[in-house]
Structures are given as C-alpha cells and as structure tokens.
Image (spheres, rainbow, N blue to C red):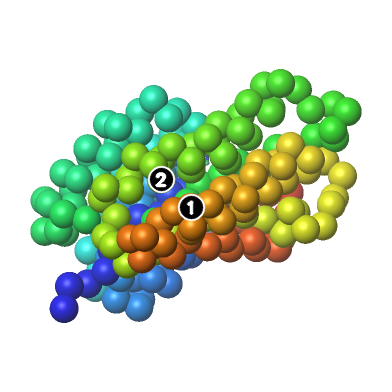
Amino acid sequence: MNRKIALITGASRGLGRSAAVHLAAQGIDIIGTYNSRADEAQALVTELQALGAKAAMLQLDVGRSENFAAFAAQVEQILGQTFERQRFDFLINNAGVGVHALFSETTPEQFDLLMNVQLKGPFFLTQQLLPLINDGGRIVNISSGLTRFSLPGYGAYAAMKGAMEVLTRYQAKELGARQIGVNVLAPGAIETDFGGGTVR
Ligand SMILES: NC(=O)c1ccc[n+]([C@@H]2O[C@H](COP(=O)([O-])OP(=O)(O)OC[C@H]3O[C@@H](n4cnc5c(N)ncnc54)[C@H](OP(=O)(O)O)[C@@H]3O)[C@@H](O)[C@H]2O)c1
C-alpha cells in the first residue's frame, strides 16, 4: 500500500516541525514549507529521512497568494520526482505569525499582515491545492484557544482564527462530497518562537 503524504505549511519551526517529525515517525512522508529559515528546513529534511520518510521542503510565503499557482505547480512536480505520486493526502495549514496589539492600538498594517497570513493565505492555498489532494484525505486548520477565551492584545489575531474556524465548517460541508475531512486544531499556549517567543 502507498505511504500517505502530508503537506505542512510552516514546518521549519515550532508546531509544524513537531508535527512533521511525529507524522514521519508514524510512516507518513512529508512535504513541508518554510518562509525564511532555509537552514532549519534543510536540517528537518535530514531528520525526517533518518526516520525513514521521504521528505522535501519548499519555500512559501503564505501571505502572498499571488504565488500560490506557481507553488501548486512546484508541489505537483516534486510529488512526481521525489514521491512518485500525483497527489498527497493531508494538508495542515499551520504557518502563522503572532501580532500582539491592543484593539485600540492595532494598525491597518498589522491587521493586513494577520489577514493575509492567517486567513486569506490558508483560504486560497487550500483552494489552489484541492486538485492535488486525494479523495478521502484530510485538511487540518490550526486555530488557537484565543477564539474561546480572550486575552488583551490578541483581538485581530483571534478574529482571523475565528474566521478560519467558520470557514472550516464550510470546507467540511463542501469537501465531504470527496470524503475529505476538514477539522480545526486549536492549541493553547505552547513554548515556540511564535510572536517573538512571547509564550516562553
Ligand atoms: N505557540 C502557540 O502558543 C500557539 C498557540 C495557538 C496557536 N498557534 C498557531 O500555531 C501555528 C504555528 O505556530 P508556532 O507556535 O509553531 O510558531 P513559530 O514557532 O513561530 O513557527 C512559525 C512557522 O510558520 C512559518 N511562517 C511564518 N510566517 C510565514 C509566512 N508569512 N508564510 C509562510 N510561513 C510562515 C515559519 O517559517 P520560517 O521559520 O521559515 O520563517 C515557521 O515555520 C500558527 O498558526 C499559530 O497561530 C500557536
């Protein structure tokens, strides 16, 4: 039986990296993306291969949806070359940035950054990648506990995550026809580099 393949955005660090390592240890091959940390990405490929997985890391800025068609073409190419497959099975929309700003002080630039990376990015990236996801596959959208409890300074960030949770229900409804399950994972605070390491 074919091994399954997961595509994880923001796999170079933090939760995405951890997910890649845990999935690889369970026999799943990995296509990961990184934004700025090519060195971390290469180190991860080596670690995943040592676990017996096929692995590739591609550069992607989730905030720049105008590049998604070219990214999808790159994924298609690497699927054929490295994985000898035409499609992958699991998409994990994990890449994200944290902005800490009170509602009264949040700037349009901060709002746009969060909207582009946390909402518009996963919306149109998933749309673009749909033809490459196997029927019966899975999509996981990473949200945050901050959609359920409120801490000062996270209004814009949590609003985008809340929108992703609503979108997830619509994706599940519409993609159910292809037996693609869509779920939200909403972690609490985890010590990563997120938001400049504020959780630490
Ligand atoms: N840590 C927490 O407490 C926490 C709690 C709830 C939810 N979350 C969510 O969990 C997800 C992962 O967070 P984390 O804690 O693992 O963060 P992290 O350690 O800061 O890692 C962020 C990852 O996202 C990538 N990334 C950042 N900006 C990007 C962009 N514009 N385009 C593409 N990739 C980008 C980074 O790539 P490079 O390293 O290559 O730049 C890195 O791989 C985020 O969606 C976050 O909102 C985190």
Q: Measuring 84% from the left and 52% from the top, which residue is drawn there? A: 150
Q: Which type of secondary structure does the marked residue at label 1 adopt?
A: helix
Of circles 1 and 2, the one toward us is: 1
Q: Quadrant of residue 100?
A: top right
Q: Quadrant of residue 118?
A: top right
Q: Measuring 12% from the left and 52% from the top, which residue is drawn there? A: 80
Q: Position of residue 156 (x, y in %)?
A: 74, 37
Q: Which type of secondary structure does the marked residue at label 2 adopt?
A: helix
Asked if residue 146 lies left or right of residue 182, the reply is: right
Quarter of the figure that contains the C terminus: bottom right
Label located before the other in sequence (1 or 2): 2
Number of disc labels = 2
Would you say the residues marked 1 and 2 are in contact, meaning their CB atoms lie under 8 Å apart? yes
- Give the spatial CA distance, label 1 vs label 2: 10 Å
Q: Amino acid at mark 1?
A: Gln
Q: Measuring 35% from the left and 78% from the top, which residue is drawn there? A: 26
Q: Amino acid at mark 2?
A: Thr
Would you call the spot at circle 2 few (<14 residues within 10 Å), some (14-19), or many (20 or more)? many
Residue 110 visible, this angle = yes
Q: Position of residue 72 (x, y in %)?
A: 28, 40
Residue 114 versus residue 56: which sits nearer the camera? 114
Q: Which residue is mark 2?
A: 126
Residue 195 visible, this angle = no
Asked if residue 4 lies left or right of residue 23, the reply is: left
Q: Which residue is mark 1?
A: 171
